Amino acid sequence: MRGSVARVHRDGDDLLAEIDVENVNQAGTVTASGRATVRLPAQGTDLAPAFPQTGEHRPGMYG
């Protein structure tokens, strides 16, 4: 997997980053690609409540 930030911009009070990602196999061929938009935390904010607390984790395919 590799990726790069394509754009960072504001949407109201939110700071957003658009990230281009792609999967490349051993031969160097791109086998999947896409774009993700993520909300960046404002300076001095605490994101802890947005993530599962201890005991709430539900193991998936990889643990």
Image (tube, helix red, strand yellow):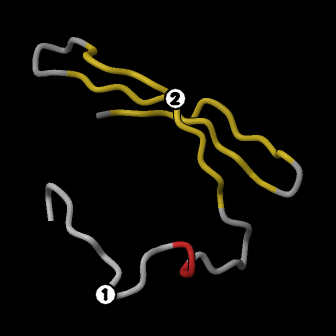
Q: Which residue does the image show at 34% across and 88% down from the upper left?
A: 54
Q: Which residue does the image show at 15% across and 65% down from the upper left?
A: 63
Residue 27, above or below 12 = above
For the view shown, which residue lies furthest in the bottom direction?
54
> According to the image, label 1 marks what residue?
55
Q: Which residue does the image show at 34% across and 33% down from the upper left?
A: 2
Residue type at mark 1 is Gly
Tally of marks: 2
Residue 3, above or below 15 = above
Q: Which residue does the image show at 31% across and 20% down from the upper left?
A: 32
Which corner quadrant holds the N terminus? top left
Where residue 23 sits, quadrant-wise, is top left
Q: Is residue 58 left or right of residue 47?
A: left
Residue type at mark 2 is Arg
Q: Position of residue 7 (x, y in %)?
A: 67, 33
For the view shown, which residue lies furthest in the left direction?
26
> According to the image, label 2 marks what residue?
35
Q: Position of residue 52 (x, y in %)?
A: 42, 77
Mark 2 nearby-residue class (10 Å; few <14, some 14–19, many ≥20):
some
Residue 29, above or below 43 = above
Disc 2 on helix, strand or loop? strand
Disc 1 on helix, strand or loop? loop
Q: Nearer the viewer, mark 2 or mark 1?
A: 1
Q: Position of residue 13 (x, y in %)?
A: 86, 57
Report, in whole angstroms, how far the alpha carbon at label 2 lies from the one at label 1.
32 Å
